[in-house]
Image: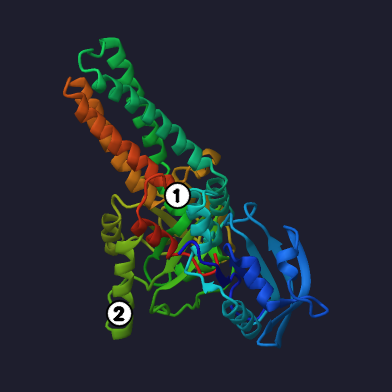
Amino acid sequence: MTDDTIAAIATPLGEGGLAVIRISGKDALAVADRCFRGPKGKAGVVSRAASHTVHYGFIEREGRRVDEVLLAVLRAPKTFTREDVVEISCHGGILPAQLTLEAVLSSGARSAEPGEFTKRAFLNGRIDLAQAEAVADVIHSRTELALAAAQEQLAGSLSRKIGDVRDALMKTLAHIEAHIDFPDEDIAPDALSRLVERLTASAAFIEGLLRSAREGQILRRGVRAAIIGPPNAGKSSLLNQLLGHERAIVSPVQGTTRDTIEETANIRGLPIVFIDTAGLRRSEDAIEREGIRRSEETLARAELILRVVDLTQPADADDVELSRKLEGRAHVVVFNKSDLPARRESSQPSAASVAVSCATGAGIEELKDAIVRTVCGGGLQPEMLQAAINARHQRALIRAREALERCVSTLREDQALELAAMELRIATAAVGEVVGKTSTEDLLDSIFSQFCIGK
């Protein structure tokens, strides 16, 4: 199917200034020639055009003019897919884009599958698999830090690190296999020690990459943070302050929030999904009880908890029970209403705590700092962004690390070199999976099916 010429709308459907239809494949220029006409109705403009040039004209289908367009000619190999590419910019809007695409398809192109342009860029060697995944990460970035991490991966920072460790493993494997080929020559103790040292260094390098997994997951999907506490403690007011706009209804009437409200905010570059919940208390109201049940479910699933405490109210038995539930959980205690006379201490020795006033905004910036410290121990450092691995990378690298550990044990216990070589091959293949040096069609289909059509 990679010999087919494919086409798709590369911009979101809807009304806008422009829409772009992308064509890629060995017949891209011929397909465009069949439906593009120059300003004087001249045909054959595209196939004679120089690479990286733009041409004004019209798209036609069955002799009828479809739209006025600009057409860009991009000849292989200096294109995203390393194939001949044509990009047609037509008027924005669902109908002009769809009719232009239909004219292209009727001229000999096939509708592209989700992610097929990026898949071809990978198959044709322009990018590796980690870079291909970074394309999707760039598109879905929700904060500048997430975008920076995705761009680092797209530029090949992770790929270079993976390439270094894979090269080291392959050199060590070649050394071991050379000794297998000459069984009469035992490995000298100092040579064996150097092999173990190399493998141990590679395992440590992989462990360093694995430590970036949490940061990578945070940047890609965010952290779910539940805002909990008793009624009228200021949970909805806190949500509004963190978002910077009025999202939740605030009222002095207890039980105003009956359901969870979710919104994502950019907190010091981290995408945090804040979930405002119903006040935790005993209630006879059936609807409020359902809201409280959902609050309990949200609390159980949350990765971070903002426990809102009303400084104007004395501690009670419910406070003790909630403190017990939060033991061992990542949480920040938010002492609200610091602008009013306090009836309790605004400190919490066992967890991060910040005094704020949702009425005046005092302490909100300090709270944001506390959130970042709790989530990732002080924030993401620039070096973390260079190798923020995703869940697929993590699984592959864990297999590689485990195989290396078995390989080292085999060598130290003076077992058969064939066993050490087998484990080292497993480790090398697992590392190669990250960048697509070893991959299956099912894996590629799984990755690229998550892309939008046209990318």
**In the depicted view, which residue is nearer to us: 79 or 404?**
79
- SS for callout 2: helix
Task: Answer with left or right where residue 103 lies relative to residue 285.
Answer: right
Comes first in the chain, label 2 or label 1: 1
Q: Which residue is mark 1?
A: 216
Q: Which residue is mark 2?
A: 290
Q: Are marks 2 and 1 in contact (CB under 8 Å)?
A: no
**In the depicted view, which residue is nearer to us: 391 or 423?**
423
Q: Amino acid at mark 2?
A: Glu
The residue at 37%/50% (across/down) is 439
In this view of the protein, can residue 354 be seen by the observer? no
Quarter in which the C terminus is drawn: bottom right
- SS for callout 1: helix
Colour mapping used in the image: rainbow
Task: Answer with left or right where residue 243 lies relative to residue 61.
Answer: left
Task: Answer with left or right where residue 341 lies relative to residue 44.
Answer: left
Image location of residue 118, percent across then percent down: 52, 59
Q: CA distance from mark 2 to mark 1?
A: 35 Å
In this view of the protein, can residue 219 be seen by the observer? yes
